[in-house]
Amino acid sequence: MSEEKAEAQPQPHDENKIIAERREKLSKLREAGGVFPNDFRRAHSMDALAREFGALDKPALEEKKPSATIAGRMVLKRVMGKASFATLQDGSGKIQIYVSNDITGAETHDAFKHWDLGDILGVSGTLFKTNKGELTVQASQLRLLTKALRPLPEKFHGLADQEVRYRQRYVDLIVNEGSRKVFVERSKIVQSIRESMVAEGFLEVETPMMHSIPGGAAARPFKTHHNALDMELFLRIAPELYLKRLVVGGIEKVFEINRNFRNEGMSTRHNPEFTMMEMYAAYETVEYMMDLTERIVRTAARTALGTEQVTYQGNAIELGKPFARLPIPEAIRKFDPQSATADLRDRAWLAARLKQVGGAVEGHHGWGSLQLMVFEAVAEKHLIQPTFVTEYPAEVSPLARRADRDPELVDRFELFIDAKEMANGFSELNDPEDQAQRFLDQAQKKNAGDQEAMFYDADYIRALEYGLPPTAGAGIGIDRLVMILTDSPSIRDVILFPQMRAEA
RNA sequence: GGGUCGUUAGCUCAGCUGGUAGAGCAGCGGACUUUUAAUCCGUUGGUCGGCGGUUCGAACCCGCCACGGCCUACCA
């Protein structure tokens, strides 16, 4: 455990009358004994009962009298004197229970009347259907398993406050079915991606999260410190350089699904920690990576959602058809008529155009950086349907292999869906001397004030000097893909516990 | 980081031109043996995000601060 002495935690100061009443109820239960029991065993989930018996009609159930033993949180309660109904919710769904003086007993029923919404109950009894045809457990045994001290949000409107939904995800998950659905789908998407990768012959690995030299992306890192080693460490901004070391080592198809950390601004598309899948395949090229990326995304949609057509915030997204491919210069000319006849490698022209469209030009920007920024300013927002953007300048791609036809370019793509960057991949730079030179260029950019420029990683150069086979790699932003596939407007909607400021 | 909108009971929300705080749900008490957002009767509950200012008087006007939403910037 922690070496630091734990400070006394402040008591929550949001007590109120409802909580006080529930504490009083709990106190009385304690006196009677047996609170928070752990000897109840459930036999059925809500959805299993619905699947097995939901289709039977009232007389059939009355003849069969199936027994049921369930447990769940009470989310609705209707007391009617000598009998009551309540709705219990477990991880699989909801079911109604019926509590009565006749069957359950007056003493238990009277106790039940003082139990609260949010309490967790264990019930055993017999299944029947009400006059309205609702499958219901008629309780013969009824126990309070967990007393809830805090009241649930309003039963009809649920929890609407975004801030509370993010800070107290447990409450959001209890009352908002849509939120539960998003995270179930997220899990299915990740599972699908993992299965796709394994089926394609890739080996899943875990590489360090703490790096002494942060590399593999252009981003500002979080810093931390190892006490015993007395060394500065960085939370990783990408696993790329470690995964390629593994390809050097002979793991020819390798992938990792894990967290990256970037110390940058937050938005509806950025969380400081986010999940990325990176993959590398020896003896393949960027073309293979585009095809593979497309298969992964399409398969994830089909297996997790059952469809290759999704709607994202009102935009129909077609994932079933081949994804478009669009070189950067073509994209700029297509969406910015003023660029139609311009020389898109003319630094002065690009700088002027960038300023016109609201960009900021700095001294260390070459034509490649400027061209990319013009693309981002004029074209990116139009890329709603899945589109592989290609022909990236070498200047902005310090880890990518130069294109054979033009050494100023690299064999690289980014995948855009709904104008969001979803994936980034390229034929990997495996020339150790070119890589060393590009690291030196990055170091110069860092000296010139580019805080996101990369560090020189001497061990990575050493690894390349042992020989990285011709290799292609790509990374897929899992959170953003989940956003698209679950129609979630904010990355915070697809991360269980998104980063928040300290509570006010 | 910048802009903008918001913060009122446990929850969802009203609250007019500044006149001293409201509803529904939840809770508490009562009635009710097929309800289902149960219903009916009664009822408790508020530092109006915080601090300061203007005013005879502030939930409301002004300033600062905190937290959040959206847009924007950097990035994935």
Image: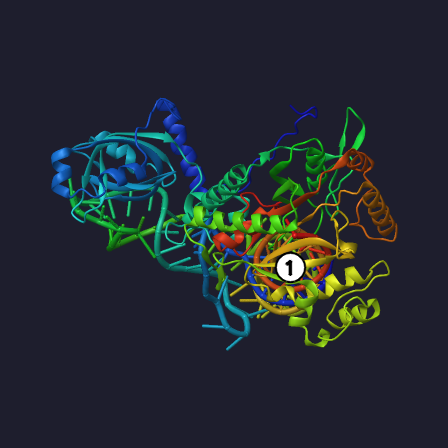
Q: Residue A436 falls in which quadrant of the image?
A: top right
Label count reads 1
Q: Which residue is depicted at the point 42% across and 53% down?
A: A307
Left or right of A336? Residue A150 is left
| Front-most of residues A28 and B39 | B39
Q: Looking at the picture, how far across and down is residue A64, in whole percent?
A: 14, 34
Task: Please state the chain letter of the residue tagged with numbered disc 1 in the rendered image.
Answer: A
Amino acid, disc 1:
Val
Q: Dot 1 lies on which element?
A: strand
The reply to whether residue A380 is visible in this rendering is yes
Q: Which residue is depicted at the point 68% across and 37% down?
A: A243
Q: Which residue is depicted at the point 84% across and 69% down?
A: A348
The quadrant of the picture occupied by the N terminus of chain A is top right
Left or right of A173? Residue A352 is right
| Front-most of residues A469 and A361 | A469
Name the colour scheme. rainbow
Q: Residue A56 falls in which quadrant of the image?
A: top left
Kindly identify which residue carries mark 1.
Answer: A389
Left or right of A50? Residue A150 is right
Q: Residue A87 falls in which quadrant of the image?
A: top left
Q: Looking at the picture, how far across and down is residue A313, in whole percent?
A: 50, 61
Q: Looking at the picture, how far across and down is residue A316, in whole percent?
A: 48, 63
The reply to whether residue A504 is visible in this rendering is no
Number of other residues with Cα within 10 Å of mark 1, as a class: few under 14, some 14 to 19, many 20 or more: many
Q: Looking at the picture, how far across and down is residue A110, in whole percent?
A: 25, 34
Q: Is residue A367 above or below residue A491?
A: below
Q: Which residue is depicted at the point 82% across and 46% down?
A: A434
